[in-house]
Image: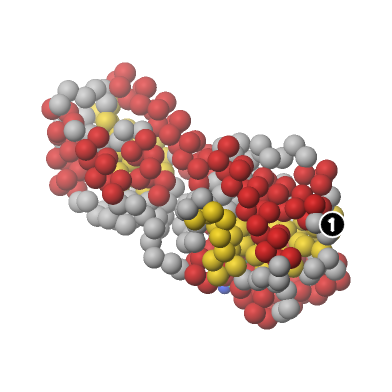
């Protein structure tokens, strides 16, 4: 391998820049060339490559987002699009790829490397933590810290006004963010896609909270919570069934994906970048690098995107006990 291409794809997450930096610097360390590919697979199809040396990634480890930009590419889903991407990579002299992204990006990488002679290595970059073969994806820890900071702020105003807040956090299919920020932010209830706790239980615990003399209550709701009601419908339901609360709603949205990456995410990105490049140099392909038991490990891409749920439901019990 003489030249590695690196790209970020799918939704952005904090730590992607730190990951790009790590890939570029590991290439420089091993005296191989590196090119950045602009806007993920779309840039491969358009042939948008940027030569990257060690100095070209200075000052980005602390920056959110991705300097290479990211995109969702419809064309890459077609054989013609992928052929064009391959031809461009060959013309550029790229002979291996590091893909930083989520499950869709990994699926694309697998399809591509099954059709063409192009080794690929994945780095999991998504705040949702919905990838298997790693306890943490890049950006997840930062998102947790961002959300907890916001919950603390909402708590200040909630307790000043004796209010109940429903706070919607990201998580259409998985409740990692909701569950963890719920415990860390002292939420009364945490509603996640994996478990339907039921509306009766919600009312019961809100009553209990009120009767125990608490001045504010927070309920964390993942976007895809299994009760099947969004935060506004939950507010209406509680308004209908309880008079003792003044209810407010806060939808956190895209701010959860931004911001400077945490120390944890910067270190994780650095380790993942080194492991990804060195694994390619060892002749490996079609793996994702991940963190398991604090060790960098490789998981085949197909397993990384469809393993068993790794949600820690014990946290629901911990949360229950903490709200006593
Ligand atoms: P996030 O978790 O943030 O959504 P993601 O990587 O899952 O990130 P997707 O939009 O699902 O984001 O996928 C990124 C890109 O990967 C797609 O825009 C598409 O170009 C490519 N891709 C996804 N699935 C396939 C597929 N089956 N074949 C070819 N390319 C694919």
Camera sees residue 207: yes
Chosen colour scheme: secondary structure
Q: Secondary structure at mark 1?
A: loop
Q: Position of residue 147 (x, y in %)?
A: 45, 37
> Viewed as shown, does residue 281 lie left or right of 149?
right
Q: Position of residue 312 (x, y in %)?
A: 34, 52
Q: How many marks?
A: 1
> Viewed as shown, does residue 61 lie left or right of 195?
right
> Viewed as shown, does residue 158 lie left or right of 20?
left
Measuring 19% from the left and 33% from the top, which residue is drawn there?
A: 324
Q: Residues within 10 Å of mark 1 (few under 14, many from 20)?
A: few
Measuring 21% from the left and 29% from the top, which residue is drawn there?
A: 245
For the N terminus, the quadrant is bottom right
**Quadrant field for ligand 1:** bottom right
> Which residue occupies the foreground of this view, 161 or 25?
25
> Which residue occupies the foreground of this view, 187 or 24?
24
* Residue highlighted by disc 1: 31
Measuring 81% from the left and 52% from the top, which residue is drawn there?
A: 28
Tell me the quarter of the picture where residue 33 sits: bottom right
Q: Position of residue 263 (x, y in %)?
A: 58, 37
Camera sees residue 9: no
Measuring 19% from the left and 48% from the top, which residue is drawn there?
A: 199
Q: Position of residue 279 (x, y in %)?
A: 67, 64
Q: Is mark 1 within 8 Å of ligand 1?
A: no
Tell me the quarter of the picture where residue 7 sits: bottom right
> Which residue occupies the foreground of this view, 82 or 111?
111
Q: Is residue 119 above or below residue 222?
A: below
> Viewed as shown, does residue 288 lie left or right of 178?
right
């Amino acid at each position: 391998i003489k030249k590695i291409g690196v790209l970020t794809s799918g939704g952005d997450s904090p730590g992607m820049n730190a990951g790009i930096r790590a890939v570029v610097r590991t290439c420089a360390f091993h005296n191989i060339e590196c090119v950045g590919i602009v806007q993920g697979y779309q840039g491969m199809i358009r042939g948008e490559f940027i030569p990257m040396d060690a100095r070209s990634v200075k000052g980005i480890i602390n920056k959110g987002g991705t300097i290479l930009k990211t995109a969702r590419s419809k064309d890459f889903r077609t054989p013609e699009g992928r052929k064009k991407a391959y031809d461009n990579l060959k013309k550029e002299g790229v002979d291996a790829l590091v893909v930083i992204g989520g499950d869709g990006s990994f699926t694309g990488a697998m399809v591509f490397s099954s059709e063409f002679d192009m080794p690929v290595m994945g780095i999991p970059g998504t705040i949702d933590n919905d990838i298997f073969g790693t306890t943490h994806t890049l950006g997840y820890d930062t998102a947790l810290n961002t959300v907890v900071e916001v919950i603390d702020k909402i708590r200040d105003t909630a307790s000043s006004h004796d209010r109940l807040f429903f706070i919607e956090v990201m998580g259409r299919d998985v409740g990692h963010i909701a569950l963890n920020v719920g415990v860390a932010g002292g939420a009364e209830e945490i509603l996640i896609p994996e478990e339907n706790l039921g509306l009766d239980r919600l009312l019961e615990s809100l009553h209990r909270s009120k009767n125990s003399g608490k001045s504010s209550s927070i309920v964390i709701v993942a976007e895809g919570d299994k009760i099947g009601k969004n935060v506004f419908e939950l507010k209406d339901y509680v308004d209908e069934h309880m008079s003792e609360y003044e209810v407010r709603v806060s939808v956190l949205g895209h701010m959860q994906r931004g911001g400077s990456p945490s120390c944890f995410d910067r270190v994780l990105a650095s380790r993942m970048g080194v492991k990804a490049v060195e694994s390619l140099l060892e002749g490996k392909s079609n793996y994702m690098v991940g963190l398991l038991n604090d060790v960098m490990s490789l998981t085949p891409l197909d397993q990384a995107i469809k393993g068993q749920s790794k949600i820690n439901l014990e946290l629901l019990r911990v949360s229950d006990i903490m709200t006593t």
